[in-house]
Amino acid sequence: MSETQWAEVTSSARRLVHFACRALIAFLVGATAASAQTAPTSADPENYPNRTIRYIVPYPPGGFNDTLARLVSQKLAEAWGVPVVVENRPGGGTLIGTEAVAKAPADGYTLLGVAFPFGANPSIYKNLPYDTVKDFTPLVFAGQTQNLLVIKPSMPINSVKELIDYARKNPGKVSYGSTGTGSSDHLSMELFKSMTGIDIVHVPYKGSAPMVNDLLGGHIDIAFDNTPNVLPQVKADKLRALGVSSKTRSALAPNVSTVSEAGVSGYEVTVWFGIVGPAGMRSEIVQKLNAQMNSIFKMDDVKRRFVDQGVDPVGGAPSQFADHIRAEIQKWAKVVKDANIQPE
């Protein structure tokens, strides 16, 4: 074979390899694109959920926040056949766990249990590491309860009116306990103070149990606390109940008047619980979660667990919960300002 013929063969072979490579690349690109279009993704509503869901609770185990998470997680897992794992991430006044969810992917696989402090924290902290409205997707209003205003039996007081009169005659001499700045029991009393004009001293604790123990021991005088936390002591005559914080009387203590009925007209504090996700969740996934959670709250065994802890199931649309959160932020901003509580 001459050199000219050999050159022609070599050139033809190179062209053949070149065209074969181009064809292979085109095939691979097309196959990849087709796969991307047809393969299910984690954020695809039609295939949601297809892997483990995390439910973060920014509180330690125990209490209704934890109970709610475990109830919902169990029922979601049973209904959808995927693991739903509860992660307790307490600390920083709920900020640690809450921030983690704010920064999580908005794919429906990270949920957050929120409660009363979620609406109060924007006024309690100067620099929240998230925006309470913009960084979350409200999913459902889970339930609500009320606080009970209780007093140590040694105090010569038997009604809300008598408490107000006594505090006015003894400014700065009555002490009240709370489970910390921004908690429902703290702000319940600050609202009570601002509406009655009384001067009483705040003594914060790191939880309900030590606060109630000091109240029983006579180290503090009065407190608001979640009704289930103090009702046993009231029934045992170890504490005296003066009123409930809600708009209507509690089914757990029907003989105790509301604070509004007892003389502080318009007084109302609701202790609430709900579930949110990161901002930007697809509407189909939001609706799927909301519908399933509403179904869960209607189950007889779930309703019994709620009632056992003094909580009324609520439910409803995501938009209703969003409206509630915004209203809470506005309400407690005014209370914090009027009470001259300095943001931390």
Image (spheres, rainbow, N blue to C red):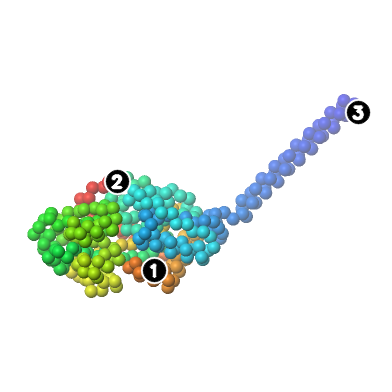
Give the left or right position of residue 9, taking residue 25 as reference.
Answer: right
Query: How many C-alpha atoms fall within 10 Å of the one at disc 1: few (<14), some, or many (≥20)?
Result: some
Quarter of the figure with residue 193? bottom left
Query: Which of the marked residues, 1 or 3, is nearer the chain's N terminus?
Result: 3
Instruction: Name the amino acid, label 2.
Output: Lys
- Give the class, few, some or many, for how many residues have Cα within 10 Å of label 3's Cα (few <14, many ≥20): few
Front residue of this view, candidates 331 and 191: 191
- The amino acid type of the residue labelled 1 equals Arg
| Quadrant position of residue 327 | bottom left
Report the Cα–Cα distance between label 1 and label 3: 93 Å
Q: Is residue 204 above or below residue 24?
A: below
Viewer-nearest residue: 149 or 321: 149
Element carrying mark 1: helix
Of callouts 1 and 2, which one flags the residue occurring earlier in the amino acid sequence?
2
Classify the position of the N terminus by image quarter. Answer: top right
Query: Residue reaching furthest top?
Result: 3
Residue 228 against residue 219 in the figure, above or below: below
x and y percent of residue 304 in the render? 39, 71
Mark 3 falls on what kind of element? loop
Q: Which residue is under mark 2? A: 126
Residue 319: where, in percent of width, then height?
Answer: 40, 62
- Residue under the point 15% across and 68% down: 158
Please, which residue is most extreme toward the right here? 1
Does residue 276 appear anywhere in the picture? yes
Establish if 118 lies above or below 249: above
- The residue beneath circle 3 is 1
Residue 230: x percent and y percent?
Answer: 26, 64
Residue under label 1: 305
The front one of 329 and 168 is: 168
Mark 3 or mark 2: whose residue is earlier in sequence = 3
- Residue 186 visible? The answer is no
